[in-house]
């Protein structure tokens, strides 16, 4: 299956512009951060031919969404907010339990903040939640930090970073026009095998201030 993660900057460039970036990649599951107003998100999902669940109700501006296409079907949907520090914006995650033909997984979209101490605390909250799940997990996250920073290391020590292999160049995602940093990640649990990962180019330079990350993965046989 093909999974992706993308901070779409609240569709400021338009839902159609963002769809032009990821549509040709045909993701089966797309984990979106800063998913913007409901109308734009619905238009985006319809353009891609995907269903969508989002965290609009409990969140302010920092909203997340999980998009998926048939034959995946949703089960329960969980949202949670992290404890904010100071005057930081309210942040959290959405976890959608998906199933197809006897295969189950949990797709999680999350966006951490700008304060390093807050990010580290929220990364621990996130992995505490994940530790209670029985099904395989795929997580798309805008960490707002690079791989050697504390929150990224904490998550990376507990899950597999599908976009990082020693023999490969880093998949830079930010800023969108000329990326110089990798702050967007796809993590998976041990039951999910990684085949390849990449960052699309072309229209991705102007559709958002981030670039998406995509990967071809496989749920291993139990």
Image (cartoon, helix red, strand yellow):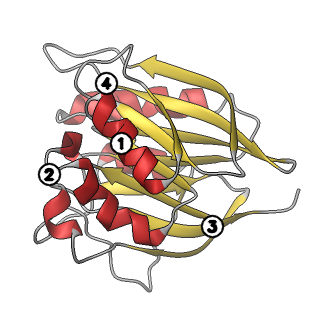
In this view, 222 is above or below 199: above
Crowd tier of the residue under label 4, counting other residues whose Cα lies within 10 Å: few below 14, some 14–19, many 20 or above: many
**Image position of 82 (left or right of 62):** right
Kindly tell me whether residue 57 is visible in this rendering.
yes
Task: Give the foreground label among 4 and 2.
Answer: 2
Kindly tell me whether residue 146 is visible in this rendering.
no
Q: Quadrant of the N terminus?
A: bottom right
Q: Residue at x 34, y 72 (%)?
A: 199
**Tag 3 residue:** 217
**Image position of 29 (left or right of 37):** right
Task: Give the foreground label among 1 and 2.
Answer: 1
Farthest residue, direction bottom: 167
Disc tally is 4
Residue 81: x and y in percent read 40, 18
For label 4, the SS is loop
Please report whichever mark, 1 or 2, sits nearer to the chain's N-terminal start: 2
- The one nearer the camera, 149 or 122, is 122
**Tag 1 residue:** 43
Q: CA distance from mark 1 to mark 4?
A: 24 Å
């Amino acid at each position: 299956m093909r999974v992706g993660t993308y901070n779409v900057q609240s569709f400021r460039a338009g839902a159609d512009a963002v769809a032009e970036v990821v549509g040709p990649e045909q993701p089966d599951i797309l984990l979106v951060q800063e998913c913007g107003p409901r109308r734009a998100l619905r238009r985006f999902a319809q353009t891609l031919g995907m269903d969508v669940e989002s965290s609009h109700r409990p969140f302010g501006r920092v909203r997340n969404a999980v998009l998926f296409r048939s034959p995946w079907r949703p089960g329960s949907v969980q949202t949670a907010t992290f404890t904010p520090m100071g005057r930081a914006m309210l942040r959290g995650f959405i976890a959608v339990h998906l199933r197809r033909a006897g295969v189950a997984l949990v797709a999680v979209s999350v966006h951490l903040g700008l304060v390093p101490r807050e990010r580290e605390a929220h990364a621990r909250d996130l992995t505490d939640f994940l530790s209670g799940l029985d099904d395989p997990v795929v997580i798309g996250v805008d960490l707002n930090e690079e791989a050697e920073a504390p929150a990224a290391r904490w998550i990376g020590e507990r899950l597999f970073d599908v976009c990082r292999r020693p023999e490969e160049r880093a998949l830079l995602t930010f800023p969108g026009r000329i990326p110089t940093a990798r702050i967007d990640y796809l993590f998976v649990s041990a039951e999910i095998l990684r085949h390849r990962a990449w960052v699309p180019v072309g229209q991705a330079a102007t559709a958002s201030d981030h670039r998406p990350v995509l990967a071809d993965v496989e749920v291993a046989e139990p």
